[in-house]
Amino acid sequence: MGRRDLDYLVVALMFITGLYAAVSGLLADLFGFPQFLLHRYAGYACVALVLVHLLLNKERVAAYLRRRPKGARRQEQPLSPRRRTPVIGRRGFLLAILTGALGVLMGRWTARAEEGAADDPDWRYHEWSKPGGSGWSGLLRDWGSRPSPYKTYPDAPRISLPDPGGFRGLWLEEAIEARRSRREYVPGVLSLKELARLLHAAQGITDPRGFRAAPSAGALYPVEVYVVVHDVAGLEPGLYHYAVADHALEQLRVADLRSAMVVAGIGQEMLGEAQVCFVLTAILQRTRWRYRERAYRYVLLEAGHIGQNIYLAATSMGLGACAVGAFLDDRVNDLLGVDGREETAVYLLTVGKLTS
């Protein structure tokens, strides 16, 4: 293949890739295709072809840039020049360059609005966790087996909780209307009965089949509830785990954890002023084995359901509650003694006494 034939091929490919980049860019913008890689690659290929075309015609480009008179160029030619067929005219040359540039510019312009979102981890997970979003890797991956829906600490001392029944506070509609995030609490002591009601509202078993107070995808219940006790009658300050199946507390640590909670909560003083702090953790495998890519979505939704139950129960009982999403994950995990992988903290809530 001669130089002229090669240049013809380059021009043809340049036109095709430029046209493809322009059309695919318009389609990407029209239908909102994010990270349309084939469109970008076509733009890059078009630019590369433009550079090759310029190299193949560097003499013509140099002559054009110098803008020499036509007569001068004729006089410099040999007396018996070899007859050559022009590879491409000036207009065609400019058109090819403009086409390539248009393809690249269209690609950058149409992709700019999507690039910010496409690079965000939350957006990537959202796309990946759509049904079929993980592709063949999701179908072929081993998602593990089903673990027990109950976690216990067999060696920990147990404290039986009172029956949560027998209390009638605000009507549901009244509690919804009155619910607010209360961050200021007064000194006082929460009764063990009040704590039992809060825990039952959060995760208590409400059906002989094992169903609980808060909804859970597939009734798999991946969320565990820990209680950091500051001021509760009959309980030493420290860390406890709610044993759902027995409606009991398992004592994990006796200590004043006010300062530790404030530090873990990035300086939020209410974590040390409330009578109790609830820490919700997620054992992801409980949901992952069935719902695969969507497991993390469902776990966070469930934590939100539990949090709202605590809010409404506290409001109905005349207590204040506040959810906390800003905390140092590793510090909270270390405080609980969980690894942050198989089980990790996802949500904090404070409950405390309010001024009368």
Image: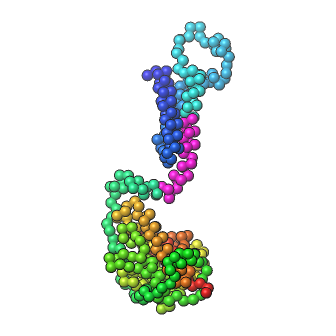
Q: Position of residue 81 (x, y in %)?
A: 56, 10
Q: Nearer the viewer, residue 39 or 32?
A: 32
Quick check: 326 left or right of 66? left
Residue 44 visible here = no
- Asked if residue 122 is positioned above or below residue 246 in the image, the reply reads above
Q: Position of residue 124 (x, y in %)?
A: 48, 55
Q: Quadrant of the N terminus?
A: top left
Q: Nearer the viewer, residue 230 or 247?
A: 247
Q: Nearer the viewer, residue 245 or 76?
A: 245
Q: In the rendered structure, does residue 116 fall within the stretch colored magenta?
A: yes
Q: Which residues are magenta?
A: 102-124
- Asked if residue 331 is positioned above or below residue 72 in the image, the reply reads below
Q: Position of residue 39 (x, y in %)?
A: 49, 40
Q: Residue drawn 39% across and 76% down? A: 212
Q: Main secondary structure of the magenta part?
A: helix
Q: Position of residue 59 (x, y in %)?
A: 59, 22
